[in-house]
Image (cartoon, helix red, strand yellow):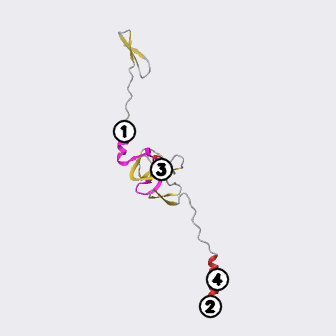
Amino acid sequence: MNKRLIISLLFVMTVAGCKAPAKPAMTDDTIVTHEVNGVTLTHRNAVSPPAEFTPVNASYRALYPASLMSRPDFSGKVVRTLETGKTYEVLGQVEHFWMALADEGKDELIGYVPMRAVVKADQYEATVRKASVRPKARKKATCVNVDGSGKACKNNNNGTWILD
């Protein structure tokens, strides 16, 4: 019995000196999850979770090379820049009318952009076409009557007046 007691005490003393393994240090690239409004979001530690979240889950395309931010406002850090015309997955709309984005075909939150930076994928071509069509400036009439019988017109190329 003494042998068992001594071995048990020796085991307890040995294990009592052990420490639990240290947790790995959290870096910006550590993947974390948060639940917002009943939706679980997976993202890098560098990207802050939103306070509000409304799911969208639709394909959108970038209208211009917008900055992808770590927070849903301009006070965050720039994570990367969107590629014009590239398709992204909009996970949802967050506070301040910002969109939470993921790479196409993935569900990991990569950052936030303003709502105007992306457009639904099926409306992209029409939106770009509409933005590129600009009304032509109307030329002002640059002729004036001279003594009721003639007129003088301004040459738009060099600004000189020509009498007719």
Stretch of the chain drawn in magenta: 102-130
Q: Position of residue 157 (x, y in %)?
A: 42, 23
The Cα–Cα distance between marks 4 and 3, rounded to whole angstroms, is: 57 Å
Q: In the picture, residue 158 is in which quadrant?
A: top left
Residue with the mark numbered 2: 1
Q: Residues within 10 Å of mark 4 (few under 14, many from 20)?
A: few
Are the residues tagged 4 and 1 within 8 Å (C-beta)? no
Image position of 2 with respect to 88: above or below = below
Question: Which of the two discs, 4 and 1, sits closer to the camera?
Answer: 4
At x 59%, y 68%, the residue is: 22
Residue with the mark numbered 3: 112
Image position of 89 with respect to 161: above or below = below
At x 63%, y 89%, the residue is: 3
Upstream in sequence: badge 4 or badge 3: 4
Residue with the mark numbered 4: 10
Q: Inspect the image, locate mark 4, and give the three-letter code of the amino acid beneath it.
A: Leu
Q: Inspect the image, locate mark 2, and give the three-letter code of the amino acid beneath it.
A: Met
